[in-house]
Amino acid sequence: MRIPTPRQLPSGKWFVQVRIKNKSFPITRDTKEECVNEATYIKASHAIGQLPIREKEFLTIDQLVQAYILSRENKGRSPSTVRGYIVTHNSHFNSIKHQQFSRIRNWQDIINEESNQYSGQTMVHAWGLLAASFRYAGLPVPNVSIDHERNRELPFLGKAQLAVFLNAIRDTKVELAALLALHSLRCSEIYALTRDHIDTVNRTILVDKSCVLDKNNHYVIRNSNKTKLSTRTIPIFVPRLLEIVEDKTDPLIDIKQNAMRKAIKRICENNGLPSVGLQGLRRSFASLCHSKNIPERTTMLWGGWSSSVTMHKFYIKLDEEDLSRQAQTMMLETYDLLTNVNATSKKRWKLKRFEGS
């Protein structure tokens, strides 16, 4: 697919004009890359809509996916969803992107090769985007098998590790963001938070907005969350959070997401801790609630989880200390039970022997 080279305007913006069957589509964007992306979408979309099925088979995988993404954007999908599609497309199946659909035969081999690098859940999402693109174009979806149970390790912090982590992040630029993640907030929810959302009197956090990146990597504040249950009020259980926000003004978080991720990763490495990230801290929250016997329904409400299955599969992890303690308790209880059984059996045996004498 040939795209004209964008040129920079005196204003600093970039411009490109796409022509399709004597019709012009002028495009002006902030960056050259954005111009190219938009021009690619328009051309791919036109190709999908105008070609008969037998000719669509000769489009490349990239063209098919680009057209599908544009169709979803035109249907009103949220900026974060569209960006998610783009990130997924840019991250997976790079070896076949510029191959024509009709020339690819070994789909299962391609899936198997890609699966060596990613978890089963990631592969489901990546293949789902391809399959949706094929269906949108009216093409047959290849029959493939994905190992759904193949999951990479999901790191979290146990109780002893949390104590080390809390001490390590004290007075750093990432302390507030990390503490908010430990109260179950997602990254998008953390960056949408304002000082008014934290009630220091009642010691609660109101979560009712999200901050997401659109397809052009611009931050967008949404007056809604991931799901209805994501809008919630969370009790503050780490007093240090109250101390930090006491004199804070907006914006609460003044560090870029990538810089924050790198800083947290570095702190974990320097202190011999699992490399958790914000998602891992949210996972640590769920695991801590589980170890403290917080009712499952309460944990779901605090964390904004709509499915207990998702919460257990991806978030609740068992602390090794808890496992060791539970094993020791079970061993002692079993020992006591066997001791009592043996004592009872011995007593009965003596009784029978006495009665028979």
Image: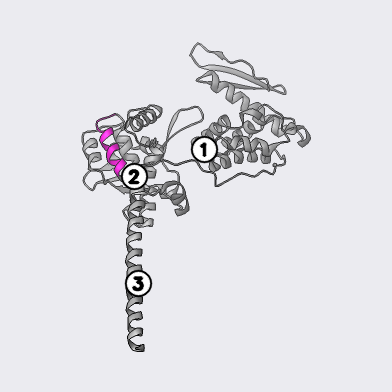
Q: CA distance from mark 1 to mark 3?
A: 64 Å
Element type where label 1 sits in the image: helix
Q: Nearer the viewer, residue 46 or 282?
A: 282
Q: Secondary structure at mark 2?
A: loop
Q: Are marks 2 and 1 in contact (CB under 8 Å)?
A: no
Q: Is residue 56 above or below residue 160?
A: above
Residues packed near mark 3 inside 10 Å, few (<14), some (14 to 19) or many (20 plus): few
Of circles 2 and 1, which is in front?
A: 2
Percent of width and height locating residue 338: 36, 68
Q: Amino acid at mark 2?
A: Gly
Q: Which residues are magenta?
A: 160-172
- Taking the spot 53% from the left edge, 13% from the top edge, the residue there is 8
Q: Nearer the viewer, residue 183 or 191?
A: 183
Number of the label disc, if any, that sits on residue 143: none
- The residue labelled by disc 2 is 158
The Cα atoms of the two marked residues, 3 and 2, are separated by 39 Å
Left or right of 79 on screen, residue 137: right
> How far apart in space, not on screen, are marks 2 and 1 (Cα)?
32 Å
The residue wearing badge 3 is 342
| Residue 208 appears in the rendering | no
The question of residue 147 being in magenta is answered with no
Q: Looking at the image, tell me whether mark 2 or mark 1 is earlier in sequence order.
A: 1
Q: Secondary structure at mark 3?
A: helix
Residue 87 in the image, given as x and y percentages of width and height: 53, 32
Residue named by callout 1 = 81
Q: Which residue lies at the image location 46% right of the left edge and 53% below the top edge?
A: 307
Most prominent secondary structure in the magenta stretch? helix
Compared to residue 34, the image places residue 12 above or below, namely: above
Q: Percent x, y for residue 330?
A: 35, 60
What's the colour scheme? one colour
